[in-house]
Amino acid sequence: MIRIYDWLNQEALDLHYSLQAAGIMGETIVLNDEGNLPEDITSPYRYFCNATSDTGKALYFNQLTVPEGWQITGNNTEGEVWSYGVKKATIHYHMPLYLRLIKQVDWLTLDGKVYVTDHYNQYGWCFAKTYFDGNQQVVLKKYFTKQGHEVISHNLVTGDVLLSWQGKDYHFTRLVDFILFYLAEAGYNLSNIWYNSLGLPFLASYYYQGEGVDTLFWQEDVGEAIPGNMKLILEGNAGRTKRVVVQQKTVYEKLLRLASAEEAEKIAYLGYIYPNIRTNHNRKQALILTNSDQIEGLDNLLRNLQDYHIHIAALTEMSQHLIDYESFQQVTLYPNVSQKMVDQLFEACDVYLDINHGGEILSASRRAYESNLLILGFDNTVHQRQFMSADHIFKAQEPEQMADFLRQCQDLPRAVAKQRSEAGQSTPADYHQILGGY
């Protein structure tokens, strides 16, 4: 059995972790490789280009090779390459961004347009190049070995793929044909293909000629009609794919309303198994991670929660507005916080206040959920509602309700259990029940 993911996004990672936690093993493949795959996940490009863990390590942003006299600058968001006042390139980082490890470099024309992008993997070498035409449209992508030998060329205009492999040249007129060649060449057991997209992974299942039973794991929303390729599955016209496993409860319920009774029998619900890093110790220690000095309701919370200590951490310097909160004995500030200190704060706190405006940093809500911190937020600040109980989101106009809740909540672990339940947490037993003998 193999799993085929379109992209290694968070949903794919959640499914990957859930299957492992349930003890369901199998080969895992990603069809769009951005160069930073875990060691237990591979791709056609990693396979044919022989990218393995012993071939190097990721490049720090200022390790990029540039002509003599050029300058490399950077911050925790991106880097830049300059030559005598002219910007030559933009450097993008792998996640997490603060590590500043090179993911790709966009090389620029004199008028600031991207003409080629160099893609770097976690081993520190340029494994792919994307080429653009004058209208900034992608026209070609090539993949290379560490030594710079071209192995794969994908024409994004015609769809043709050229492969140089073991002394032979292969020409595929469709990308799916290249994927099917890879699956056969790598020798995978294709009796069961589990995949998470109605795009290229679905096509690989649809066009594969061998016997087997496949499963679609649906991780997206749906509109007012069942997607076309999913309709093929539910009507029994998709070859090997016989069922759809939906991973969001609201989407599952919506699909049941859209499907006929016969189609509904092929639809099942299965949430994720999330990490359970530690237990909640019922301490009155609250954490806020922010790069903004706009923190909703903070003054009210400080007035009404005298027995709570609030830790506020930022990856950057703090404005004077935030620094002024140091005058409160119950507040500790952490400007330019290190990753080590962030780890310590998630161990020391049992409440996470998702009350900062602006973007979320360090996937704070997810980490708080996995660490069993009780997550509270306001309706105009919450960043990831899927990890929160609906009862733990308060109106911004009534901040005292959040303070009242915390004063009255004497059993934080019990509230966290409710939070876990409402987030659709599944168990290994659920996975074995739905997926059977896999």
Image (cartoon, helix red, strand yellow):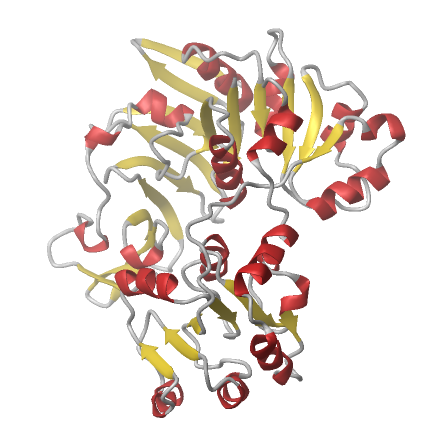
In-front residue for pair 200/342: 342
Is residue 174 visible in the rendered structure shown here? no
- Residue 316 vertical position relative to residue 13 in the rendered view, above or below: below
Horizontally, is 423 left or right of 363 in the view?
Answer: right
Instruction: Name above or below for residue 77 compared with residue 140.
Output: below
Asked where in the image residue 48 lies, by quadrant, the reply is top left
Q: Quadrant of the C terminus?
A: top right
Q: Looking at the image, can residue 316 be seen?
A: yes
Q: Is residue 116 above or below residue 371?
A: above
Residue appearing at x 31%, y 24% in the figure:
49
Name of the residue lying farthest toward the right? 261
Left or right of 132, for residue 407: right
Identify the residue at horizontal 35%, vertical 22% (top origin).
47
Q: Position of residue 1 (x, y in %)?
A: 52, 17
Q: Position of residue 436 (x, y in %)?
A: 63, 21
Within the image, what quadrant is residue 86 found in?
bottom left
Please provide percent x and percent y for residue 164.
Answer: 34, 16
Spot occupied by residue 189 in the image (x, y as percentages of width and height)? 49, 11
| Left or right relative to 32: residue 169 | left
